[in-house]
Image (cartoon, rainbow, N blue to C red):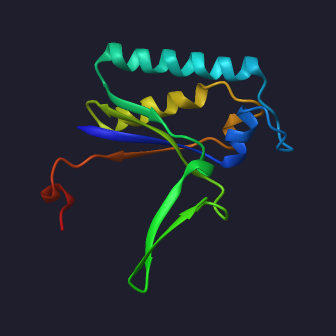
Amino acid sequence: MKYMIQSYASQQDYDAMAGKDTGRSGWSGEAVADMHQFMEAFNKELEESGELVETRALAAPVHTRRLGSRGGEAFVTDGPYAETQEVLAGYWIVECESFDRATAIAARLGQCPYPGDPGDTMYADIRPIMDSSADLGF
């Protein structure tokens, strides 16, 4: 079965990785390089095990547009996350034997280098991907 592993961050996290002063633990160039090295190794392990289907990082939330409708009129906004602290930062789609295996894969992300204590702030969601609308059960 396929599962989507979703990781989260905030605009503040993106700013800190870019070297901007956010008032929190900053990311040095070495810390960013360590994170990239971890992610490359993590993705390579998943490729070699045959479990990686797709992975992508997403641009900072500030580059997002939201399309909606109010009273039948379409609207587009920039920066729809002004009041939201966390947004989807990236995802992996894996195909593996069980939900427990997908959870174990996601747990490995907790080993990614991160300034400060990643255990205080990092988490991931794991969701099964349905093959058809019939799998949704409604």
Front residue of this view, candidates 56 and 50: 56
> Residue 25: percent from the left, percent from the top?
82, 36
Residue 106 at x, y percent in the picture: 47, 34
Residue drawn at x 50%, y 33% is 107
Q: What's the residue at 72%, 46% (across, down)? A: 12
Instruction: Determine the image quadrant of residue 43.
Output: top left
Residue furthest to the bottom in view is 71
Residue 12, placed above or below residue 94: below
Quarter holding residue 93: top left
Q: Residue at x 23, y 37 (%)?
A: 1
What quarter of the picture does the C terminus occupy?
bottom left
Q: Residue furthest left?
A: 134
Which is nearer the eye, 75 or 60? Answer: 75
Q: Nearer the viewer, residue 55 or 94?
A: 55
52 over 85 or under it: above or below: above
Q: Residue at x 54, y 52 (%)?
A: 64
**Drawn side of residue 37 relative to residue 55, left or right:** right
Residue 31, percent from left and from top:
72, 21
